């Protein structure tokens, strides 16, 4: 590389700068509060896994595996993949760590980065953060509804507006094979009018055709047989119950018979949450963007080598939520407010200030300071700006006498106290 080349973050990846951390924090705080309330435990997995785990779990013919995986070979010759999503690694961990033998349902949540080699565009990155919830060992439809409710509650708690939920059932191993056959027969009869990708999908991943956004495939999709008309008895009643639960808890939804999701492991319920707007909102183009998605995956644990354990979960995209928060004027987490400011003048005072600062930290009093500045006026201005209630002034004379001046920033009143009494005096004044 020439000396002049500027080093940049990899394409589609970005730094999370200090000014954006407050959004991540706000989302994290809301998600972890809700996770606690609903009894979910947090889990972290390595950002890389055996490549085989992903191809087995997500499906070798899916776009995620075929086009979007970041892979690497270790010096020892292991083939690893950067996680494109969290569900398969969590299932691996659930099996590996004996969580199948713990009391079920077992509920886990996560928050962290994922990697997909996609074409970068607005709101589509190659490294992006997801949070998500997974429930293992419960096949009741109430769990599907609860997972949807949890995501809806999080987005509502963040005060996001114009949200939509779409839901569908894609059946299970009883009814889906028949439906897939029906669908591919229908599509084969229209093959010449399909887009190039869909022509390939007929053989590889026929359900994904329902999800195709290409203009030329739309009329063909509209006439296609719909899975909801071909669900087996069990899937049909499961889906009906999920909708009844959602009605009961007043979570709004629309049925979308074309919703299939990109990964192979789903069974029965699938859903997505969107933000939708007819107009541009503060830089966000009109249209819809997916904020979260998930569903039931009753066969995945077994597929990856565990017991026959039903499961259900979903994931949300943190950057998408943040850009919506910004567009809708929603703030991130607030910086902790300082209570007092410590101003110092002169070498000795600076030294004493350092240890005084430690006394306040141990007493959990938040202190602002500007040790790099030597002008008292500049320090008092800074104290004002930070909203300090009190400013402690430690000049050369005070430092020599072992005292400090406490100034009430509102009234301008000042009082001199001994240095070793500074913390208790401040505490008393803050209480008033
Ligand atoms: P998925 O499992 O692909 O539906 O992903 C769940 C959520 O993650 C989506 O609804 C998006 O909000 C977010 N997401 C997925 N892919 C990306 C990406 N490349 N960049 C940013 N966010 C993404």
Image: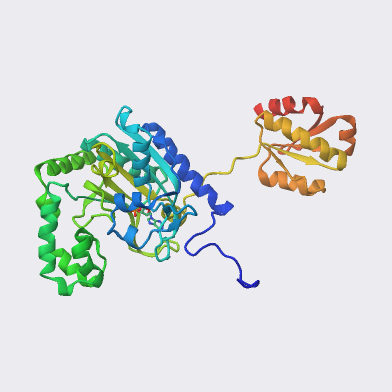
Left or right of residue 178, residue 371 in this image: right
Residue found at x 65% / y 71%: 3
- Ligand 1 is found in the corner quadrant, namely bottom left
Percent across and percent down for residue 240 are 15, 42
64 and 336: which is toward the camera: 64
Residue at the extreme bottom: 192
State left or right for residue 375 relative to residue 116. right
Q: Quadrant of the C terminus?
A: top right
- Work out whether 115 lies above or below 11: above
**Observer able to see residue 160:** yes
For the point 54% across and 62% down, the residue is 9
Residue 277 can be seen in this image = no
Q: How are the colours assigned in the image?
A: rainbow
Q: Residue at x 36, y 47 (%)?
A: 315
User: Measured from the top left, where is residue 281 in percent x and y?
Assistant: 41, 61
- 391 or 219: nearer the eye? 219
Nearest the viewer among 234 and 146 is: 234
Residue 376 left/right relative to 137: right
Image location (x, y in percent) of residue 214 = 26, 69
**Above or below, 302 relative to 99:** below
* Residue occupying the far front of the picture: 76
Q: Quadrant of residue 39?
A: top left
Classify residue 405 as left or right of residue 279: right
In which quadrant of the rendered view does residue 351 lie? top right
Write the residue at 23% across / 72% down: 195
Q: Position of residue 202 (x, y in %)?
A: 18, 64
- Could you tell me which quadrant the N terminus lies in? bottom right
Give residue 420's quadrant in the image. Answer: top right
Total marks in image: 0
């Amino acid at each position: 590389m020439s000396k002049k080349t500027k080093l940049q973050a990899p394409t589609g990846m970005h730094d999370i700068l200090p000014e954006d951390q407050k959004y991540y924090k706000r989302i994290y705080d809301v998600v972890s509060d809700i996770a606690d309330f609903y009894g979910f435990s947090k889990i972290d997995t390595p950002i890389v896994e055996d490549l085989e785990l992903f191809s087995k779990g997500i499906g070798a013919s899916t776009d995620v595996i075929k086009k979007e995986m970041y892979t690497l070979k270790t010096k020892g010759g292991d083939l690893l993949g950067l996680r494109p999503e969290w569900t398969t690694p969590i299932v691996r961990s659930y099996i590996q760590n004996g969580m199948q033998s713990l009391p079920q349902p077992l509920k886990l949540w996560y928050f962290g980065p994922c990697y997909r080699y996609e074409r970068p565009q607005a709101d589509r990155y190659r490294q992006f953060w997801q949070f998500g919830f997974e429930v293992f060992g419960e096949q009741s439809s109430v769990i599907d509804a609860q997972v949807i409710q949890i995501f809806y509650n999080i987005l509502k708690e963040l005060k996001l507006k114009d949200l939509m939920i779409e839901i569908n059932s894609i059946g299970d191993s009883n009814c889906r094979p028949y439906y897939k056959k029906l669908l591919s027969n229908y599509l084969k009869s229209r093959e010449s009018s399909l887009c190039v990708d869909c022509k390939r999908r007929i053989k590889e991943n026929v359900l994904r055709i329902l999800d195709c956004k290409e203009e030329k495939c739309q009329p063909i999709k509209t006439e296609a047989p719909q899975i909801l008309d071909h669900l087996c008895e069990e899937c049909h009643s499961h889906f009906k119950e999920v909708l009844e639960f959602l009605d009961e808890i007043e979570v709004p939804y629309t049925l979308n018979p074309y919703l299939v999701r990109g990964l192979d492991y789903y069974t029965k319920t699938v859903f997505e949450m969107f933000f939708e707007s007819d107009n541009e909102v503060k830089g966000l183009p009109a249209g819809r963007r997916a904020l979260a998605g998930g569903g039931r995956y009753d066969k995945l644990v077994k597929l990856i080598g565990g017991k026959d354990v039903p499961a259900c979960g979903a994931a949300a995209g943190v950057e998408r939520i943040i850009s919506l928060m910004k567009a809708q004027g929603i703030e991130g987490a607030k910086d902790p407010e300082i209570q007092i400011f410590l101003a110092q003048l002169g070498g000795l005072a600076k030294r004493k200030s350092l240890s005084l600062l430690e006394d306040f930290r141990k007493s959990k009093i938040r202190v602002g300071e500007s040790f790099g500045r030597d002008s008292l006026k500049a320090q008092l201005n800074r104290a004002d700006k930070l909203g300090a209630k009190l400013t402690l002034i430690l000049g050369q004379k005070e430092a020599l006498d072992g005292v400090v001046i406490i100034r009430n920033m509102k009234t301008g009143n000042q009082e001199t106290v001994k240095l070793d009494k500074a913390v208790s005096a401040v505490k008393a004044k803050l209480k008033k």
